[in-house]
């Protein structure tokens, strides 16, 4: 046994993060660690990596009882962690990052760049990583950054590598690339722990699975012995009523129409319509231009040519402000960065897009009216919080997303652009977000929804548009398959003739 | 909760401590009035700085703005214009200087630290050029009322300060501008995505800070009865310190009027107390420096 964790307990102030963490990892094993947000996965792994110290319980490393007072101590015995947020130095090169903190030193403290570069090149070539030792890390994609962290771990002779939810920001192909590398790590008899939300995709690489719930290990088994449904039940601790399936609402007038929208090279001649009551899915690989399309519609990026019609009226949208006055709403991919003011009360986040609604005499903000209004939306969207004064940053991912949606509901938005609306959200809460989207559609909103999770699109969308390299390569109706979407998202066939027709 | 009240408790403790340590000199009307007069200018600047810091910015040029406002305001009076016009000029000059800070920050998209570091030099330089380095002395004697006069038994500046504090508090809590300042300071990107006119409101915040500083410049001039082109050097750091001691965060999105006032008065009492107790002014500076670090570290602990 490489690693064994026994009755690990950890509390932060009054909050118990872990009451009974149990887990073991064998050499050459890929062990999936699952659980809802706040179940204690990250805390448990941070304890293994020496970032936190347990209050009680034992860590056995290769049969020896150990305790790590710092990440450096854990690294010394061979434990490395690939973090959710990259901890690399963006201004340094790939090679420099690989050797950061462990530079080969020459006399007088000089660092040999040449030798470092050579070693990094060898390492990259040995593993066929799509990287160059000289590249700046800041310019890499999230997947590229992960590869650099993996290189670090290999270079430092780690025998256990912990991935904290790395697939959440990767495209399909990038994910496959990371999986390929995980398999090679496995062949080298390294142990791998993978914290994830995307269980289905990880069946391909995982050997065993451990499920945490409320700080406690509730399940460990071979992956082949459990169904996804069973695992989800362990995670949420209750019976889930099957898979979510939205029943489409009758579509009304066309609310959003795009005609030949272009912003080369990311958007080429995009035309689409979204009707009131309709949820249109936007599928494609990362970099296909889906986020760029949302940004362009919302006035965040300039458009070179093409027209946008809202309720049949041609409009010019040059800034988010103009988009908002046209009743558009963007629910961005990265809530923390672009969706919420996490340090402010959730109530203030809800009213911020339409303070007129709580103003008296045109300028004086009425706090009582604000509280009543926000409490109404909190109840309507079933946002779980202690009060509307709770800081938005303290909410769970699903509730944060609902706050962003509530903000636009209050503003009276009619056209919603959802960019990866359930990224990083618990399985149970995802369904609640789908329900909110459904309610929006039923209330007559037009919804364009970008998602990289194909099952989600199939469950929620009425139609699915597929994008590839800045173009819409096809339109699929409800009831299509993941394979069909992937075919349109990846293959150039079919798309070529469409291109020919347009030009 | 106790930690949130800590600045207030510190202020009370200082007050009580000084009352005991120096009963004959501290708790006198003359002394307390002089504390109010001495801190009024920093207090006004700190009120404006509170807005700026909440919106995620910083203004290092307020010391220079103070001098320019005070100088041009007194020059207007020197030319024989009425006092009210002089004061209005000082405020207007401050407003324009602040507006320019906001304009440069938002249009050139340069960090406010750099912009106001630049304008700190520019405004000071302009002030010295306009005045030729010489102070303005020809001021109507009644102008001294602004800084030194009493109304209903308390210093007139206290009324001015209270009025400004109430106004800034109302702006922060009850107007769109205040709410937007918090939103922009907490997450400028999200504010932009929400359709908030970020540049306009950021500029407005700097302009208000400039106005309050311009008013501070006139009070300073009134107390000295000169328009000093070298006035206000180093004041920016005291104003920032007051905000920070009062719980403002240089990361933006946090701060309050009450906190800032407490912060400014803590520094005022420390200075006054040191004088009364015969502590060297050199040590005073070190004490105030230590208080700043202490206040911020307590605040950080609270947030964990």
Image (cartoon, coloured by chain):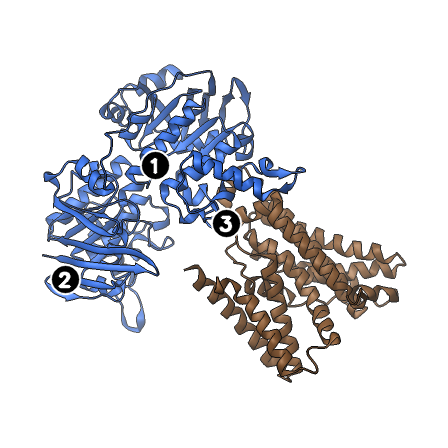
Chain colours: A blue, B brown
Q: Residues within 10 Å of mark 2 (few under 14, many from 20)?
A: some
Q: Is residue A86 above or below residue A485?
A: below
Q: Is residue A103 above or below residue A440?
A: below
Q: Position of residue A265 (x, y in %)?
A: 41, 31
Q: What chain does badge 3 belong to?
A: B
| Callout 2 and callout 3 share a chain | no
Give the quadrant of the C terminus of chain B.
bottom left
State left or right for residue B294 relative to residue A117. Answer: right
Q: Is residue A382 visible?
A: yes
| Callout 1 and callout 2 share a chain | yes
Q: Residues within 10 Å of mark 3 (few under 14, many from 20)?
A: many
Q: Residues within 10 Å of mark 1 (few under 14, many from 20)?
A: many
Which residue position is annotated with label 3?
B186
- Of residue A35 and residue A139, the one placed in the foreground of this image is A35
Which residue position is annotated with label 1?
A422
Q: Is residue B228 above or below residue B76?
A: below
- Of residue B274 and residue A304, the one placed in the foreground of this image is B274
Q: Position of residue B132 (x, y in %)?
A: 78, 65
């Amino acid at each position: 046994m490489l690693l064994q964790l026994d009755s690990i307990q950890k509390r932060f102030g009054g909050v118990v993060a872990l009451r009974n963490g149990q887990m073991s990892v064998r050499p050459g094993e890929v062990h999936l660690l699952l659980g809802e947000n706040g179940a204690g996965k990250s805390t448990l792994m941070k304890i293994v990596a020496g970032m936190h110290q347990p209050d009680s319980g034992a860590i056995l490393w290769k049969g020896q009882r150990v305790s790590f007072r710092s990440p450096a101590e854990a690294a010394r015995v061979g434990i490395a962690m690939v973090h959710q947020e990259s901890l690399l130095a963006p201004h340094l090169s790939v090679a420099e990052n690989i050797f950061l903190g462990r530079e080969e030193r020459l006399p007088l403290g000089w660092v040999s760049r040449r030798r470092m570069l050579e070693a990094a090149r060898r390492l990259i070539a040995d593993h066929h990583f799509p990287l160059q030792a000289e590249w700046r890390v800041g310019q890499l994609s999230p997947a590229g950054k992960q590869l650099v962290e993996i290189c670090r771990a290999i270079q430092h002779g780690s025998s256990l590598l912990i991935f904290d939810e790395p697939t959440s920001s990767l495209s399909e192909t990038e994910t496959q690339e990371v999986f390929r590398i995980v398999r090679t790590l496995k062949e080298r008899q390294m142990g791998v722990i993978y914290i994830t939300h995307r269980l289905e995709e990880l069946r391909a690489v995982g050997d065993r699975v451990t499920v945490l719930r409320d700080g406690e290990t509730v399940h460990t088994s071979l992956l082949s012995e459990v169904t996804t449904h069973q695992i989800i039940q362990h995670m949420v601790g209750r019976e889930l009523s099957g898979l979510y399936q939205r029943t489409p609402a009758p579509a009304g007038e066309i609310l959003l129409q795009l005609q030949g929208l272009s912003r080369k090279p990311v958007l080429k001649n995009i035309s689409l319509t979204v009707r009131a009551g309709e949820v249109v899915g936007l599928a494609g690989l990362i970099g296909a231009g889906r986020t760029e399309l949302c940004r362009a519609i919302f006035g965040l990026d300039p458009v070179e040519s093409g027209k946008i019609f809202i309720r049949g009226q041609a409009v010019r949208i040059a800034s988010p402000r103009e988009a908002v006055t046209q009743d558009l709403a963007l629910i961005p991919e990265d809530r923390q960065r672009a969706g919420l003011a996490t340090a402010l009360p959730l109530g203030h986040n809800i009213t911020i897009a339409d303070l007129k609604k709580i103003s008296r005499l045109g300028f004086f903000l009425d706090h009582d009216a604000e509280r009543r209004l926000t409490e109404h939306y909190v109840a309507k969207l079933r946002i779980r919080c202690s009060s509307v004064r709770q800081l938005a940053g303290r909410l769970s991912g699903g509730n944060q997303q609902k706050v962003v949606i509530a903000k636009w509901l209050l503003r009276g938005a009619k056209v919603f652009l959802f960019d990866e609306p359930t990224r990083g959200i618990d399985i149970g809460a995802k369904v609640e977000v789908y329900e909110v989207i459904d309610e929006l559609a039923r209330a007559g909103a037009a919804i364009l929804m970008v998602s990289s999770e194909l099952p989600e699109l199939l469950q929620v969308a009425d139609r699915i548009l597929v994008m590839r390299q800045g173009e819409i390569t096809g339109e699929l109706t409800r009831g299509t398959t993941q394979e069909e979407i992937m075919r349109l998202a990846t293959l150039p066939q079919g798309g070529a003739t469409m291109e020919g027709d347009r030009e | 909760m106790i930690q949130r009240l800590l600045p207030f408790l510190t202020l009370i403790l200082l007050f009580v401590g000084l009352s005991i340590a120096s009963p004959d000199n501290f708790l006198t009307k003359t002394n307390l009035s002089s504390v109010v007069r001495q801190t009024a200018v920093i207090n006004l600047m700190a009120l404006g700085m509170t807005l700026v810091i909440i919106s995620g910015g910083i203004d290092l040029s307020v010391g220079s703005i103070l001098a320019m406002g005070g100088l041009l305001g007194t020059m207007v009076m020197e030319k024989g214009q009425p006092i009210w016009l002089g004061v209005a000029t000082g405020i207007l000059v401050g407003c324009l200087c602040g507006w320019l800070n906001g304009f440069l920050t938002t249009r050139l998209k340069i960090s406010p630290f750099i912009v106001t570091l630049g304008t700190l030099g520019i405004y000071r330089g302009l002030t010295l050029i306009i005045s030729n380095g010489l102070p303005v002395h020809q001021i109507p004697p009644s102008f001294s009322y602004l800084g030194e006069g009493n109304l209903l038994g308390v210093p007139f500046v206290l009324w001015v300060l209270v009025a400004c504090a109430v106004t800034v508090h109302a702006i922060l809590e009850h107007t769109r501008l205040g709410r937007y300042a918090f939103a922009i300071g907490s997450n400028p990107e999200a504010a932009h995505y929400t359709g908030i006119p970020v540049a306009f409101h950021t500029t407005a915040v700097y302009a208000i800070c400039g106005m309050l500083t311009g008013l501070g410049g006139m009070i300073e001039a009134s107390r000295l009865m000169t328009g000093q082109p070298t006035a206000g050097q180093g004041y920016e750091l005291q104003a920032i310190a007051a905000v920070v001691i009062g719980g403002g965060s240089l990361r933006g999105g946090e701060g309050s009027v009450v906190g800032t006032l407490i912060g400014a008065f803590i520094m005022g009492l420390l200075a006054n107390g040191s004088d009364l107790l015969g502590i060297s002014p050199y040590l005073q500076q070190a004490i105030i420096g230590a208080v700043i670090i202490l206040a911020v570290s307590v605040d950080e602990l609270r947030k964990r």
